Image (cartoon, rainbow, N blue to C red):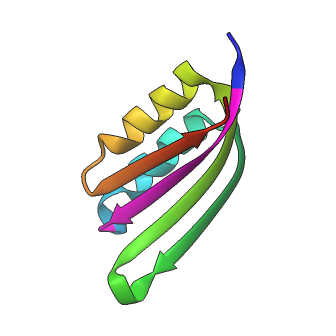
Amino acid sequence: MEKRIGVIGIVVEHREQVADELNRILSLYGDIIVGRMGIPYRDRGLSVISLIVDGTTDDIGALTGKLGNLPGVRVKTALTR
């Protein structure tokens, strides 16, 4: 299957409730994560994470699906063609 490069944007509310599970999921998919940047936005009570990924659409979809199922986590993805 063809690999694609993409950007995943993650917004996390109530970080303390999901941080352990979120990091566990990201570790599981570490082989497709090229880069990661996390910014705590304390004034708004949010954390924002951006990922650069290189993987199949199945792998990227599985990652975003698991992240999006966490309570208070919103995920958006943009992929190359």
Residue 11 lies in the magenta-colored region: yes
Placement of 20 over or under 1, stated as above or below? below
The magenta-colored residue range is 4-14
Name the residue furthest front. 81
Name the residue furthest left. 71
Horizontal and vertical percent position of residue 20: 42, 53
Horizontal and vertical percent position of residue 18: 34, 56
Horizontal and vertical percent position of residue 49: 53, 61
Q: Residue at x 58, y 58 (%)?
A: 50
Check the picture and name the quadrant holding the C terminus: top right
Q: In which quarter of the image is residue 28?
A: top right
Placement of 22 over or under 29, stated as above or below? below
Name the residue furthest top. 1
Q: Which residue is drawn at 67% across and 35% down?
A: 80
| Nearer to us in this view, 72 or 6 | 6
58 displayed left or right of 16: right
Residue 65 lies in the magenta-colored region: no
Q: Is the magenta stretch mostly helix, strand or loop?
A: strand
| Nearer to us in this view, 23 or 35 | 35
Q: Which residue is drawn at 31% across and 66% down?
A: 13
20 displayed left or right of 38: left
Check the picture and name the quadrant holding the N terminus: top right
Name the residue furthest right. 34
Count every numbered label the image shows and give the total. Answer: 0
